[in-house]
Image: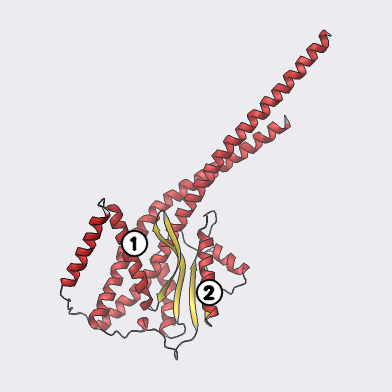
Amino acid sequence: MAKARAIVKRRKAVRNIRKITKTMQMIATAKLQKSLKRAVGSKPYTLKVRELVSDLARTIGKVDHPLLRRPTPEDRTGKIVLVVITSNRGLAGAFNGAVLRKATAFMREREAAGETVELQVIGKKGISYFNYQRRPIAVKSEAKDVPAFEGVNRAVEPLIRRFVDGEVDSVQVAYMNFISTGLQRPEVLTILPLAGLKESLDRLALQVAEKESQMKAGALDARRSGENLRAEEQQLQPEVIYDFSPSVGELLDELLPLTVKTAFFQTFLDATTSEHVARMVAMKSATDNADKMVKALTMQYNRARQSQITTELSEIMGGVEAMKG
């Protein structure tokens, strides 16, 4: 009887845990729906701002702006800023671990090259990790459930000012890039200098093209033929010449900081959305495992109860036989 009672208590505990994981899964799903709209909705704007800056730079030729400078060997300070975006809470699967491993590998690579990495960490999990590693953290802050552009703007302005003043050579962000609900990838994005955003621009353009191709039900050959046709049309189109009003300098002073801020803000949106996806998947897996465990414990209880009943019947029959004898 004692074994059956222990199984009942354990099954009850598993059911209580299942209620918690199921609730957390539902909360993460609700938060994901809101965060997904913001992350996906802002990417076209971020992409177009970068395309506008790229078109502007190609049109006017050589661009001389502090945010576009690449430090020369004589001007290099050997110092870079790495912003690591993690979450405040756990139970999110491999979300934090993947970002922290990526950030740690990046820091070791840069330090092996003789550079100094200034660490700025957002999120309690990242702060706890680097404190355990005894890494000095220059700036610490908690992650916001709903990132606001105003807050991100206040955080990035000192970085822009330090880069323009030549205090740091570059600004990098380690975060979880949200590609789709089924794919998130830890990456280190170059925020400054802006010349490093070209790779991000190409990646974003590729993501948009992939999503458009997924939405279309056409065959692969038709898609390839369409891409070839668009490429031929672009080659036949004459180069566009722009007239600028206001002046190019005023446009650059407005657009380049905006490009940095939108890129930085997009990393926060992607990180938050990826966190909700990871937590939803982790809690669903935990709920499914709890269901399996409840079924297994129920079978164990039935077997234990059956064995107990069989033993009691045997004892009764033995007593009856003894009375007859």
Which quarter of the picture shows residue 263? bottom left
| Residue at image point 41% right, 78% down | 160
Q: Secondary structure at mark 1?
A: helix
> In the picture provided, is 258 more to the left or to the right than 78?
left
Placement of the C terminus among the 4 image quadrants: top right
Left or right of 188? Residue 38 is left
Q: Residue at x 40, y 71 (%)?
A: 153
Q: Secondary structure at mark 2?
A: helix
- Res. 71 in view: yes
Which amino acid type corresponds to the residue marked 2 in the rendered image? Met
Residue 319 is labelled as none
Q: Could you say where residue 90 lies in the image, as x and y percent from the top left?
A: 55, 56
> Residue tagged by mark 2?
107
Local crowd size for mark 2, using a 10 Å CA cut-off: few (<14), some (14–19), many (≥20) = some
Give the labeled residue for mark 1: 207
Name the one closer to the observer, 1 or 209: 209
2 and 1 marks in contact (CB < 8 Å): no
Q: Residues within 10 Å of mark 1 (few under 14, many from 20)?
A: some
Q: Which percent across, then down, holds residue 273? A: 42, 57
Residue type at mark 1? Gln
